[in-house]
Amino acid sequence: MSPIVYQILHVASLLALTGGAFYGFAGAPETRKKVMMITGIASLLMVVSGFGLLAKLYSGQFPAWVIVKLVVWLAVSGLAGIGYRKRDQAGLFISIIAALLLVALFMVYYVRVHA
């Protein structure tokens, strides 16, 4: 597949995962199963497309910024499941998710470009 297909799949799954994580803090409790399925599938697609893109663009290398992005991915995926349980702390967790996403963007658009 072309790297652009991996990029589109990666960004689309990022949007679905982030949207599902944010929805988990505000959605009705009966939507939990459907939202968790969507965020789980989006999380899987995100990591598969990310490694597919990495294989296409960086043959034989494993850049350090990828480790940071993996940690961010695990954290956002984990926080997506916490949304329905910790609604009283929604503001804190949403802020954490937003900060993690900013770190991931920094890693891709600054560290990767300037490395």
Image: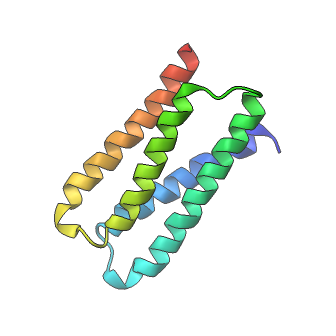
Identify which residue, 85 or 12, lies in the foreground.
85
Q: Position of residue 2 (x, y in %)?
A: 81, 40
Q: Is residue 80 above or below residue 12?
A: below
Q: Is residue 97 above or below residue 21?
A: above
Question: In this view, which residue lies farthest toward the bottom?
Answer: 30
Q: Residue 35, percent across and down?
A: 46, 73
In what quadrant of the picture does the C terminus appear? top right
* Residue 87 in view, yes or no: yes
Q: How many dots with numbers?
A: 0
User: Which quadrant holds the N terminus?
Assistant: top right
- Residue lying at 74% horizontally and 29% vertically, measured from the top left: 57
Q: Is residue 8 visible?
A: no
How does the figure colour the protein chain or chains?
A: rainbow
The picture quadrant where one finds residue 91 is: bottom left
Relative placement, left or right, of 104 versus 50 is: left
Q: Name the residue located 53 percent from the left edge and 65 percent from the top edge.
A: 40
Q: Pick out the residue farthest to the left.
A: 88
Q: Residue at x 39, y 36 (%)?
A: 102
Q: Quadrant of residue 85?
A: bottom left
The residue located at (46%, 72%) in the rendering is: 36
Q: Position of residue 15 (x, y in %)?
A: 50, 53
Q: Is residue 84 above or below residue 106?
A: below
Is residue 53 left or right of 10 when viewed as pictured? right
Q: Is residue 27 left or right of residue 104?
A: left
Question: Is 96 positioned to the left or the right of 34 in the image?
Answer: left
Residue at the far top in the pictured view: 114
Q: Residue furthest right?
A: 1
Q: Where does the image place residue 11, in percent across and percent down from the top left?
A: 58, 46
